[in-house]
Image (spheres, rainbow, N blue to C red):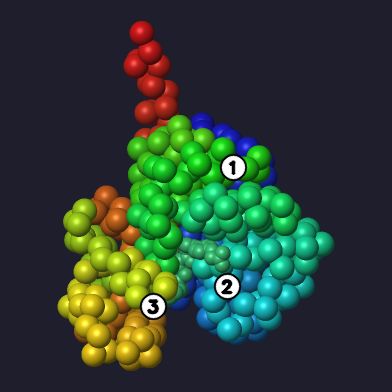
Amino acid sequence: MVKTRLCELLGIEYPIIQGGMAWIADARLAAAVSNGGGLGLIAAMNADAEWVRNEIRKARELTDRPFGVNIMLLSPNAEAVAKVVAEERVKVVTTGAGNPAKYIRLWKEAGITVLPVVASAGLAKLVERAGADGVIAEGCEAGGHIGELTTMTLIPQVCDAVNIPVVAAGGIADGRGIAAALMLGACGVQVGTRFLVADECGIHENYKARVLKAKDIDTIVTGKRLGHPVRSLKSPFSRQLFSMEYDPNYSNEELERIASGSLKRAVEGDEKQGCFMAGQSAGLVKKAQPAAEIIKEMFGEAEKILGSAGQWIK
Ligand code: TUI
């Protein structure tokens, strides 16, 4: 068995967290991952606070195990959702796309374990000082909103910068990724892209089919000009968005308008106007499976690799 301090910190069997994917990670997926021995997350994305409360209560019906909520800090509802998770005393809160320092005290007072997603050692240090229990260091191989550094370079630098546990994210979709993350100093992994094709993931079949057929070079980063780079699968829509960013005839407002709502459209299966967010690991995702099977398979592979690593020491 692969056991790390993350298992104790979160009360889970396998040191894996499911990514808090906006419009995708709901109570059903979160409960399936938690029932499979990992930590499931509900993504609060741009939803209002009462939707999040309802989803938390649904997840409690579906699992007795710990689960968490991811708060996307760019959301206009972030503050209201921050209060609801404290009221509901969820086990874990993760945050993305910003600095959550101002909420950490409220969450700690509610007994919540706080794991901000960071894309730099600087933010990792800042949230450690503000009282975070650990950080999820996410490299730019990840899908959705991303930072600049790769997982390979980010994880050891964040590990050197802080004393709290570090979870690796970005580019991890099999046991090799888990083994590598542990070697870099992480005590667990966060996985998004592979769970897109979990049986319990409710996205449209068109989205799942695109992930399953993606190759290594099939993602693209748009939104750089707008200051929020987003990785998604290449499609006529994402390529058009990409080229418009290099065209000065389009204003930032126009770009924002075209991009806005495009992830939700992808989740609903819109092949023309959808932005199918996924990480570079999409090329490693080969089959649809129950979430619990994904977790078991990944850790079975990791255990084998880690167990035989001594062969390289002569
Ligand atoms: O947040 C994510 N991934 C996301 S959020 C999202 S919804 C969205 N859609 C369109 C545009 C923007 C967002 C889809 N995918 N991952 C965690 C993550 N956080 N990646 C990078 C960061 C990050 C970046 C900068 C965290 C903190 C940060 O610091 C900025 C600051 O304020 O210090």
For the residue carrying disc 2, how many other residues have a C-alpha within 10 Å: few (<14), some (14-19), or many (20+)? many
Q: Identify the image quadrant of residue 147.
A: bottom left
* Residue 114 vertical placement versus 312 (above, below): below
**Pointer 1 with pointer 3, Cβ within 8 A:** no
Above or below for 63 versus 310? below
Q: Secondary structure at mark 1?
A: helix
Q: Which numbered marker is on residue 161?
A: 1
Q: Could you say which is closer to the camera, residue 152 or residue 59?
A: 152
Q: Nearer the viewer, residue 73 or 263?
A: 73
Q: Which residue is mark 2?
A: 73
Q: Residue 136: x percent and y percent?
A: 54, 52
Which numbered tag is attached to residue 116?
Answer: none
Compared to residue 234, the image places residue 258 above or below, namely below
Residue type, label 1: Ala
- Camera-nearest residue between 280 and 20: 280
Which mark, residue 226?
Answer: 3
| Label 2 CB-ligand 1 distance < 8 A | yes
Task: Quote the CA–CA distance across marks 2 and 1.
Answer: 23 Å
For the point 37% across and 62% down, which residue is it?
Answer: 143
Please provide percent x and percent y for residue 205: 28, 72
Q: Amino acid at mark 2?
A: Leu
